[in-house]
Image (tube, helix red, strand yellow):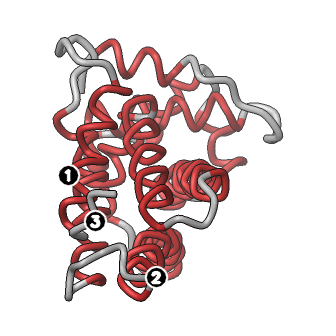
């Protein structure tokens, strides 16, 4: 995780939330990304958020619940961007797959800390908190699976394994947050197009 990407993400505006919620989620993101779930105490999170420990507990009952809320918020944002891209792409599965991958990669570039925390700290969630995040991730996965299966049915994707291909494409997109570097010499947009081409190769899209 680069300092630039954490700083960029911490400055993202927050709207439609309760007072202090945006600051608390940003503080939690900074703490979890920098220290991990076990290393980030509630006191440290309150400090990052610029609030008191008592106020933090008024907002959320536990560190696990706070991690779940952070991931839930990030995944809902991701889901909205992927769905929006697919809806704008029309009915062509090739264009839809490209739009879904592009939206996911750009979200990962601009919300890199959230993407990394989702991959590395999700394992600490249990019970209903875990189930909620799994359901949100499944919604994102379903978009890729639906596009892949329709593309095969319409004859524009040649893969005999659309579900497997869709799973690998989603993993390709989620892993982007782990290795992307803002100072790496390639823009998020350029890297998105590379990943679109790789994804279309997985589903064996028609050259046309």
Residue 139 point in image, percent of width and height:
52, 73
User: Is 21 situated left or right of 18 in this image?
Assistant: left
| Tags 2 and 1 touching, CB below 8 Å | no
Mark 1: few, some, or many residues within 10 Å (few <14, many ≥20)? some
Q: Is residue 80 above or below residue 4?
A: below
Q: Quadrant of residue 157?
A: bottom left
Question: In terms of sequence position, does the residue under pointer 2 or pointer 1 come before the other?
Answer: 2
Residue occupying the point 52% across, 70% down: 136
Which residue is under mark 2?
Answer: 150
Q: Is residue 48 above or below residue 152?
A: above
The secondary structure type at the circle numbered 3 is loop
Q: Compare residues 124 and 2 and report the one nearer the observer.
A: 2
Residue 107 point in image, percent of width and height:
46, 39
The secondary structure type at the circle numbered 2 is helix
Q: Which mark is residue 174?
A: none
Question: In terms of sequence position, does the residue under pointer 3 or pointer 2 come before the other?
Answer: 2
Q: Which mark is residue 198?
A: 1
């Amino acid at each position: 995780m680069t300092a630039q990407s954490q700083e960029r993400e911490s400055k993202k505006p927050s709207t439609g939330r309760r007072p202090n919620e945006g600051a608390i989620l940003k503080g939690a993101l900074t703490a979890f990304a920098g220290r991990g779930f076990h290393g980030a105490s509630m006191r440290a999170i309150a400090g990052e958020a610029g609030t008191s420990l008592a106020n933090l507990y008024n907002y959320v009952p536990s560190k696990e619940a706070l991690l779940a809320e952070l991931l839930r918020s990030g995944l809902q944002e991701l889901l909205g961007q992927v769905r929006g891209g697919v809806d704008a792409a029309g009915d062509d599965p090739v264009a839809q797959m490209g739009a879904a991958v592009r939206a996911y990669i750009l979200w990962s570039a601009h919300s890199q800390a959230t993407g990394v925390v989702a991959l590395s700290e999700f394992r600490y969630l249990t019970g209903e908190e875990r189930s909620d995040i799994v359901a949100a991730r499944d919604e994102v996965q379903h978009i890729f699976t639906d596009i892949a299966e329709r593309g095969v049915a319409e004859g524009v994707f040649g893969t005999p394994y659309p579900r497997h291909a869709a799973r690998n494409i989603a993993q390709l997109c989620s892993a982007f947050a782990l290795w992307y570097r803002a100072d790496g010499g390639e823009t998020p947009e350029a890297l998105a197009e590379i990943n679109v081409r790789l994804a279309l190769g997985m589903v064996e899209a028609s050259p046309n």
